[in-house]
Image: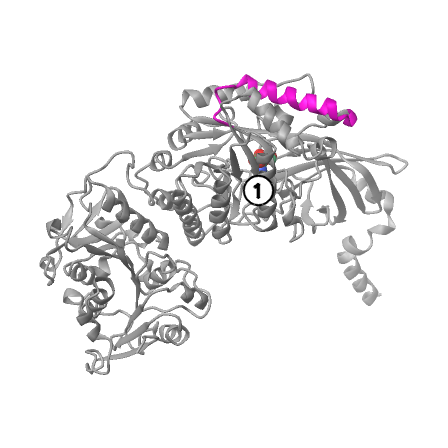
Amino acid sequence: MFPKTLSCFCCLALSATFTPAQEPTQNSEVLTGTWHCQFESQFGLQTYHFHIAINDAGDATLKGEVDARDEERKVDFVDVNVDKDSISFAEVLQFGEREFRIEYNGELKGKSLAITRSFGQRGGQDSLATRDLPKPPPKEDPAPVVDVKIDRVVRNAFKNSFLVGMAGDLPSRYSEKELELAAEHFAAITPENCMKPERVHPSENRWDFERTDALVQWAQKNEMTIHGHTLVWHAQTPDWFFDGRDPEKIKRRMKEHIDTLAGRYKGKLQSWDVVNEAIDDGGDSETAKTENLRNSNWLQTLGPGFLTLAFKFAREADPDAVLYYNDYNIESGPKHASSMVLLKRLIDDGAPIDAVGIQGHWRSGRVPFEDIEKAITDYASLGLKVSITELDVTIRGESGGQFGRRRFRSSAPPSVEDLNTQAEDYAKLFAIFKKHEDAIERITFWGLNDRRTWRWGQHPLLFDSNNNPKPAYASIVALTGKDNSEEVPESPKKVEIEDGGQGPYSAIVTESPTLAGMTIYRPDDLAAFGNEQKLPVLLWGNGACANTTEEHKNFLNEIASHGYIVLGIGPLDQLKQRDESSRQRTNASQLIAALDWIIAQNTKDDSLYFGKIDTTKVAAMGMSCGGLQAIEISGDPRITTTVVCNSGVLPGLSPMPAMPNLTKEDLKNFHAPVLYIMGGPSDIAYKNAMDDFSRVEHVPLVMTNLDVGHGGTYRRPHGGEYSPVAIAWLDWQLKEKQDAAKMFVGENSQLANDDAWTIETKNFDE
Ligand code: XIL
């Protein structure tokens, strides 16, 4: 008896999983009633409440409610089937003209119902439904708070370049704090949803202007420009537009829609996204030659002429509004090519189109910078203005603009490194936008903060969900002067180091209110510079890519005293007293921004630097991590030489997130002579530098080593032994002093004769 009972015990323990199929009725009963579960979705966390009813005949019905971030809705699930201990059903969602079907399968697992749902071809999403209500969704976004100091608001920082805006259906449902934030930081607003056809014009004879009127009123009160979004689109457009599928009727409905909506706000909106997302996704080299239009109801019923029509109707309804074609992913690949074909056709057709909106839904670490820059110039070459209309750079999960086609990955809090990488991406983007400010009208973020975003959980915007500015905010305003609408005099703050250095010009360290976050080393008395001799420029990145030149101050000061202007990363106040912010991540793009700045100063007759800078002589220079920043910017045609100190490109990915992620391919950036100043075999960068040296064949290279290790001699008096070597190189390369070359070239070069140093040169013409 005993052994039998024992084995039975085992069976019992497993029975919940293996045996209930024998008792179907009982399980139907077990299934009946209310279950709750949660899914992550593109709209944020969704809580489902399922109510299952099964009648005596075994027929099941299933109703439910969904609580999502900004809505609650009721659902009648369809195709409900109960089979023993499992249940399957479907949810049908209507997005504009399209229907989406989500399939659900539930299986009893003990006291829970394990539910898998799937959507189209994509893999399943699992959730355990229980009888208990799940915890409410987290109120606080778990992003770490980084102490980011901002001294200017972004709308002012770029006010001479372009508008900076945001999207949102303000003011209803926004807190006072959020409304203040929006009005303080942004100069433009795009209604995120309330002007879309399904919201404002839900049926042919029904308009709902409550929210749109409120938005327009609120924006006007806060002196923000308003940008209408969107008139003609395949999504969020009700089916009634296409009822009957009679082209004449549909044309009339389109005209009435545009007349009424654009007409109502005539003169109040600065622009309209007239047609949204008309080009199909994907594409290949064949479709790239065509417009590759999306097979939407508009195309099906009106043909490709629907775009020109829409633009004409919009122009008639509001003659002064800037009219946009708006789309996502049009900056890259075949879709970009198709966009060019389409835009040319619209222009040829006489469609009154003024501008292109690149939506700009990108993902941190994968932003297609080069494509973006090229797309801006391509569109400008057609005579069109360009805006980035829906900018967000997600930290986690996929990005892309596809409506209803994202796979949401559960949110994990970003690390400080993630936030810094995002800041770097934003800085690079804004450096591109600023460079093309003549073509660009507006940069609009798609949302206000990391709570008010369709990418909730992916931390895509400038403010976290508690309205604190993120590193991204600081990184973009750092690209601009304090207030670029007025000339601000050079700050009187001057620091003297080592009695001004040993060179012929007593040096000082200073800053400029128009060059935020950078330290300037230069001769104190600039009177000596102008016609006869000018100051070459040195762009400097620090060890550890730190946000201060403190470690290198003796060295940089010494160089400046020999007649150079050094623009080094980091604010002046970190020079004497380093605090936490000296560890704030820096970007190579700051060096480029500094170069742009000094070039501009040289042309402004009220600038201290007017006519005193040799802007054709520029060294990219830096130590360790900063050496990589120097390599990173070496492709800029304005760079005359690169000096890499205690650094070399790593063979693999950077171990430190703060480091620029370069590969040996980036050595191709060099287009002018390069000097390496290294610390000998004990320098941790030695191997990498020697490997760089062995690879580069296309520009003259000099490799020098002094056996001092990775730390170099920067902290020694006047920068130690590295200073005369660096100065000789700069004198040779930037001041064309042939004498200075003797330090490096010829069998009898100074360094070859110096026992402490080793030197190798290559690719010099004999
Ligand atoms: C999005 C909104 O942000 C969401 O709140 C809404 O649920 C769906 O639409 N491209 C567009 C925008 O042109 O209208 C979309 O906005 C994002 C993609």
Q: Is residue 451 left or right of residue 304?
A: left
Q: Nearer the viewer, residue 65 or 103?
A: 103
Furthest-front residue in view? 348
On the question of residue 459 being in view, the answer is: no
Q: Nearer the viewer, residue 119 or 194?
A: 194
User: Magenta stretch containing residue 625, yes or no?
Assistant: no
Is label 1's Cβ within 8 Å of ligand 1?
yes
Q: Amino acid at mark 1?
A: Tyr
- Quarter of the figure that contains the C terminus: bottom left
Q: Residues within 10 Å of mark 1 (few under 14, many from 20)?
A: many
Q: Look at mark 1 in the image and give the residue it sits on.
A: 328
Query: What are the residue bounds of the magenta stretch?
Result: 244-271
Furthest-right residue in view? 57
User: Magenta stretch containing residue 251, yes or no?
Assistant: yes
On the question of residue 510 being in view, the answer is: yes
- Quarter of the figure that contains the N terminus: bottom right
